[in-house]
Image (tube, coloured by chain):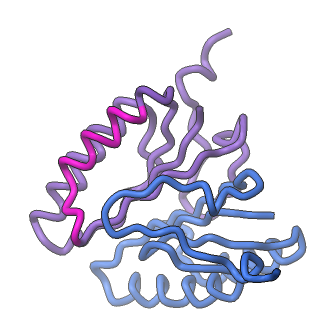
Chain colours: A blue, B purple
Amino acid sequence: MDLLLTYDVDTTTPEGRRRLRKVAKLCEGHGLRVQKSVFEIVATDVDLLHLLDDIGKTIDTDTDSIRIYRLPHNGFNNVQTLGTARIQPHREDLVL
Amino acid sequence: MDLLLTYDVDTTTPEGRRRLRKVAKLCEGHGLRVQKSVFEIVATDVDLLHLLDDIGKTIDTDTDSIRIYRLPHNGFNNVQTLGTARIQPHREDLVL
């Protein structure tokens, strides 16, 4: 399934920036970082459970916010953009 | 339609923070701010065109990134959350 994960963390502190780097590394194993704290993820239900578990151990649950939205089929290719944002190809898009 | 708008802007500068405040004000006319730079929006096609136009005049298109994802029906109520994130009711959810 295609998911969008957004992470709200205070990056004015070194600890916040460190957590963002760790969450980014976890998410990048499943997809693309499309903004500083927004990730397009392709995951099975099992992948997602593991990812949630890993993220839960990384973030500060008293201050940080993670939201994961399920997108419709082809949702990554159907994004409206302004400014520097670009639609980015996922690996499965490259399969002929 | 139900949309998710994410805004990537450098908030270490006063100008960036000012643009984020302006974009937040524009988006809050159409929905809810669920993270510092993530907005759940309900909009018609015409609403969206007006919103994109207003946002385009507000952001710095050389540095800022706006992405707008279309969510499936009931997408706002089908969000997985960690940390401080909560599912928030939209106005139409309150109609009996």
Identify the residue at image location x=48%, y=53%.
A80
Report x, y in % for residue B20.
Answer: 24, 55
Identify the residue at image location x=30%, y=45%.
B24
- The front one of A81 and A12 is A81
Q: Residue furthest right?
A: A46
Magenta segment, principal secondary structure? Answer: helix
Q: Is residue B87 above or below residue B42?
A: below
Displayed quadrant of residue B64: bottom left
Image quadrant occupied by the N terminus of chain B: top right
Report x, y in % for residue B83.
Answer: 58, 64
Displayed quadrant of residue A71: bottom right
Identify the residue at image location x=44%, y=90%.
A18
User: Is residue A74 toward the left or the right of residue A67 in the image?
Assistant: right
Q: Is residue A37 above or below residue A23?
A: above
The answer to whether residue B56 is magenta is yes
- The front one of B79 and B42 is B42
The answer to whether residue A27 is magenta is no
Q: Which residues are magenta?
A: B48-62
User: Is residue A3 toward the left or the right of residue A82 in the image?
Assistant: right
Report x, y in % for residue A19.
Answer: 49, 85
User: Is residue B81 toward the left or the right of residue A19 in the image?
Assistant: right
Q: Residue furthest left?
A: B14
Displayed quadrant of residue A6: bottom right
Q: Is residue B63 above or below residue B61?
A: below
Report x, y in % for residue A11.
Answer: 34, 78
